[in-house]
Amino acid sequence: MTTIFKNFIGGEWVGALSGETFANVNPADTRDIVGTFARSGVEDTRKAIDVAREAQPKWAAVPAPKRGEILFKAANILESRAEAVAREMTREEGKTLPESKGEVGRAINILRYIGGEGARLCGEAIPSERPRVFIHTVKKPVGVVGLITPWNFPIAIPAWKLAPALIAGNGVVLKPSDLAPLCALRLVEALDEAGVTKGALNLVTGPGSKVGNELVVNPAVGAISFTGSETTGSNIAIECAKRRARVQLEMGGKNPTIVLKDADIAEAVEVVANAAFFSTGQKCTATSRVIVEQPIVEAFTQALVERARKFKIGNGLETGIDLGPSVDEGQLKTVLDYVDIGRKEGASLLYGGARVSDGALAHGFFSTPAVLGNVTPTMRIAQEEIFGPVAAILPAKDLDHAVQIANGIRFGLSASICTRSLTSAFEFVNRIEAGLVMVNLPSAGVEYQVPFGGSKQSSIGMREQGSLAVDFYTEIKTVYMKY
Ligand code: NAD
């Protein structure tokens, strides 16, 4: 029997007012229904916003270090359930079990790290130019914040928004993606059990056009933190600008890895295969453009194709699987369509890019990792986000040319270089237009305790994660006192 999961509003688990539900389906095996969830609408969302507004002052009145202790406790609760939550993540999103375990571990780290920020919500004491005047600043919560998250990191992204929003004393309404809402719900359960004030934390599932949009347009919501596609994010920015709400957007990427001729080819292949194919390429920081210095293009390409052939494709719950499915049929179609578009544009398909449907895999959305050669910078496969296991290889004359190609794009999330030259590495770090810069490391794979975010069209607003994460969720009050 399918488990029914509900919204969490005002400290209670409640169905959508309409009574409607939707199914959360396993992309590795569509016969497996992970659960049914509330298909909420505008009224459910308004209710959650109202409740959050009412409860927020009570939550803010809990001393910040105590709020931190609640986050620590939530981390412990989640840790005690880590294995089960990881399995649910693999079932709802498709990534392999080791990847899911890693992500749950990351959510736990985030709760602990940000929990510690509760004791560090410091203002400043600043000298006044007038005698006997004392000036200081305090950090106050924004009020009610709306958090809108995608499916590709079903627990880490909700965690890296929820934790700083709560530690700052805000009331929160979280709206996860319809494709993977269960992990967000598990996180909310842990936080509720840990003792977050009833009503301060709410979860509403349902379509973005209704639940997400209501959060964006509702005047009681003071800030929106969104991670997702560029199109949705751009519309949210416009709507928030209309009512002057604070907004933070983490959107698409088309991340390059440059491989210079002095790189260790075997190591560079591992770096690229990891960044391009793991998590089925469904990471905003995944490498999708591999810019290779001309003299080693052939050797590198051959080695990457050999590496791609070794990827074991299948249900991520099974041991030894490297590559799970695309998250749904639409995403698989996008991947296969882009491989086709690339070929029509004149690129050569060197490996992969085909649906895999042998045996039980016929019930999932699997494809072989694709390597495309002879790609030129203006081709659509070199400009548009695919969000699948597709690596496009672009030859470059030298470092200057490689950086020019890498920067010749509207995105700027993550970028990597493989080289043994310190000078080339520093030139790259200085000149690359990206918020996350890696040297001899995959473009994907970031840590929780440092700032995360991109430049150009990839991100708008303040950075997430690390200690800076709290800034977006706080307002500074400047206090002048004459004594
Ligand atoms: P999406 O934009 O389709 O959906 C993201 C969220 O927005 C979902 O919860 C969705 O229901 C909601 N939404 C949809 N329409 C809305 C509307 N009109 N108003 C308000 N909310 C609405 O993105 P997705 O397909 O879930 O995620 C994949 C995208 O996310 C990729 O483009 C990827 O690059 C991006 N992403 C970026 C980062 C980053 O940090 N830069 C991280 C992960 C994913």
Image: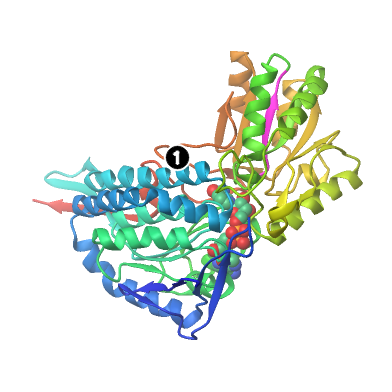
For mark 1, what is the residue?
451
**Mark 1: is the Cβ under 8 angstroms from ligand 1?**
no
Q: 11 above or below 65?
A: below
Q: How many C-alpha atoms fall within 10 Å of the one at disc 1: few (<14), some, or many (≥20)?
A: some
Rendered image quadrant of residue 430: top right
Of 222 and 388, which appears nearest the observer?
A: 388
In magenta, the rendered stretch is 253-260
4 sits left or right of 258 in the view: left
379 sits left or right of 368 in the view: right
Residue 251 visible somewhere in the drawing: no
Residue pictured at 83% horizontal, 43% vertical:
379
Residue 274: image location, x then y, percent: 62, 34
Query: Type of residue at label 1?
Result: Pro
Q: 390 above or below 60?
A: above
Residue pictured at 51% horizontal, 73% vertical:
211
Residue 161: image location, x then y, percent: 42, 54
Main secondary structure found in the magenta portion: strand
Q: 440 above or below 285?
A: above
Of 270 and 363, which appears nearest the observer?
A: 363
Residue pictured at 60% horizontal, 44% vertical:
279
Extreme residue toward the left, this view: 483
Residue 65: image location, x then y, percent: 20, 50
Residue 122: image location, x then y, percent: 24, 45
Quadrant observed for ligand 1 in the rendered image = bottom right
170 sits left or right of 62 in the view: right
Tell whether position 140 is magenta.
no
Of 372 and 6, which appears nearest the observer?
A: 6
